[in-house]
């Protein structure tokens, strides 16, 4: 599982001209689900997201977690994080989990985030969305469960 984590002052997800979710200060997270991800991958990413100390605190620029600052979390599914561009010019997505399985996996990811951190919001799985954000820093971190499990 991959997650592109961005520290934001605010973020908004729209689809078909409708606001789907918005947050103030917190994290905007794009998640990609690998073809063989398991609950261990999901749990690793969620644990990291909630404990990642990338917010200012005291005299340090990156010392507090989203929990510490009582920020908001916005999660958006993005299968293109598993694009393979090694051959040709058109990306292949064979490493992304199939849409039917990924939808279930994504929903379990969102539900676990909400259970552990109620200030969680999400985009719509499989929808075409527009994401508007104001980066803070900018601070962007890439997490990959395969690097650590």
Image: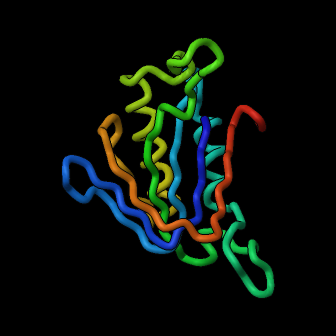
Q: x%, y% of residue 5?
A: 60, 54
Q: Residue furthest left?
A: 17
Left or right of 49, for residue 75: left
- What residue lies at 60% left-to-right and 69% top-to-bottom? 66
- Name the quadrant containing residue 69: bottom right
State the colouring used for the structure image.
rainbow
- What residue lies at 47% left-to-right and 57% top-to-bottom? 115
Q: x%, y% of residue 14?
A: 28, 54
User: How many discs mark residues in the rendered view?
Assistant: 0
- What residue lies at 39% left-to-right and 32% top-to-bottom? 104
- Name the quadrant containing residue 70: bottom right
Quarter holding the C terminus is top right
Left or right of 90, for residue 145: right
In the image shown, does 43 or 76 lie closer to the viewer? 76
| Residue 113 to residue 35: above or below | below
| Residue 134 to residue 37: above or below | below
Q: x%, y% of residue 145?
A: 69, 37
- What residue lies at 43% left-to-right and 29% top-to-bottom? 102
In the image shown, does 53 or 94 lie closer to the viewer? 94
Q: x%, y% of residue 144?
A: 68, 39
- Name the quadrant containing residue 88: top right
Quarter holding the N terminus is top right
In the image shown, does 134 or 54 lie closer to the viewer? 134
């Amino acid at each position: 599982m991959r997650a592109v984590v961005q520290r934001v002052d605010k973020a908004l997800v729209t689809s078909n001209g409708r606001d789907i979710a918005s947050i103030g200060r917190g994290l905007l997270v794009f998640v990609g689900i690998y073809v063989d991800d398991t609950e261990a991958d999901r749990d690793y990413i969620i644990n990291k997201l909630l404990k990642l100390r990338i917010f200012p605190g005291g005299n340090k620029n990156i010392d507090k977690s989203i929990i510490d600052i009582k920020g908001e979390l916005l999660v958006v599914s993005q299968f293109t994080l598993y694009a393979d561009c090694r051959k040709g010019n058109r990306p292949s997505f064979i490493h992304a989990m199939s849409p039917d399985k990924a939808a279930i996996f994504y929903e379990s990811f969102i539900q676990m985030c909400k259970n552990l951190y109620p200030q969680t919001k999400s985009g719509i799985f499989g929808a075409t969305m527009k994401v508007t954000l104001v980066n803070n820093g900018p601070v962007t971190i890439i997490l990959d469960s395969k690097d650590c499990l």
